[in-house]
Image: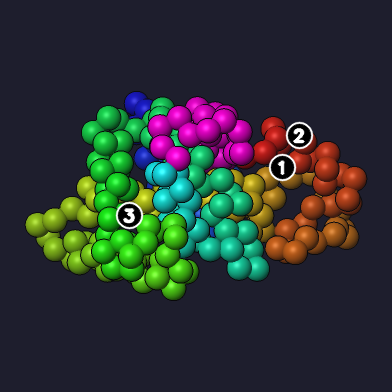
Amino acid sequence: MRRRRALEIIGAAAGAPLLVPGGAVGQALALGERIRAVTGPVGGAPPATLTPAQARTVTALAETIIPRTDTPGASEAGVSAFVDALLTGWLDAADRDRFLAGLDAVDPTARGAHGADFADCTPAQQTELVARMDADLDRLRRDPDEDERETFFYDMKRFTLAGYFTSQAGLRTLGYRIIPGAFEGCVILDQYGAGEGRPGEQRGQQSGAGGRS
């Protein structure tokens, strides 16, 4: 049951750029919060399953997949904590172990290519390594005898998208208003183009959303 529900949120978040207000969005957000609740709020307790070194690699990978530009990146959305929560309380043991084995292979690959752990590589080197993993994934996808869903990077990409697009930072990037308020003909738009109402009301809505994601 946990595996099925985790896949539901991951699948919903993969289509996040197409999200519109409705029941599916509400369910995705609710399940995202349940997943995060396993390890507490972003920036809280240390990882429960990931080692510090593994968490550092996950953070660097996620930030390469969704970097900070004029919008928040994966780190600001707490993707590493979200991945740790999935590994801790939602994935089956076989899926968790496969993910961790693939994660542990990232730094040796980076050292072989660039003489440094992935997190210590330059942004250009990190992008090159992620592009290589993505190309390998694409080759598997085109091979009828292979299943790309059984690979580390397939999960890493899905987990990153799920963590990002079910966070307040990710939803604000899309312009999605988490808690709709009363109709106002004139509202203040934030830097991402999302209407948040008057400054005082914005603070009230955020506190009513259940705190940080």
- Above or below for 4 versus 133: above
Q: Which residue is mark 1?
A: 179
Please state the horizontal and vertical placement of residue 192, each as a whole percent of the image. 70, 63
Indicate yes or no whether the magenta region holds residue 37: yes
Q: Which residue is mark 3?
A: 107
For the magenta stretch, what is the residue range? 23-52
Q: Of tags 1 and 2, which is closer to the observer?
A: 2
**Quarter-wise, where is residue 205 in the image?**
top right
Please state the horizontal and vertical placement of residue 56, each as a whole percent of the image. 46, 48
**Three-letter amino acid code at the position of disc 1:** Ile
The residue depicted at 58 percent of the width and 49 percent of the height is 77
**Position of the N terminus by quadrant:** top left
Q: How many marks?
A: 3
24 with respect to 186 (left or right): left
Closer-to-camera residue (178/71): 71
Q: CA distance from mark 1 to mark 2?
A: 8 Å
Please state the horizontal and vertical placement of residue 46, each as a whole percent of the image. 53, 33
**Position of the C terminus by quadrant:** top right
| Disc number placed over residue 208 in the picture, else none | 2
Question: Which badge, 3 or 2, comes first in the chain's sequence?
Answer: 3
201 with respect to 52 (left or right): right
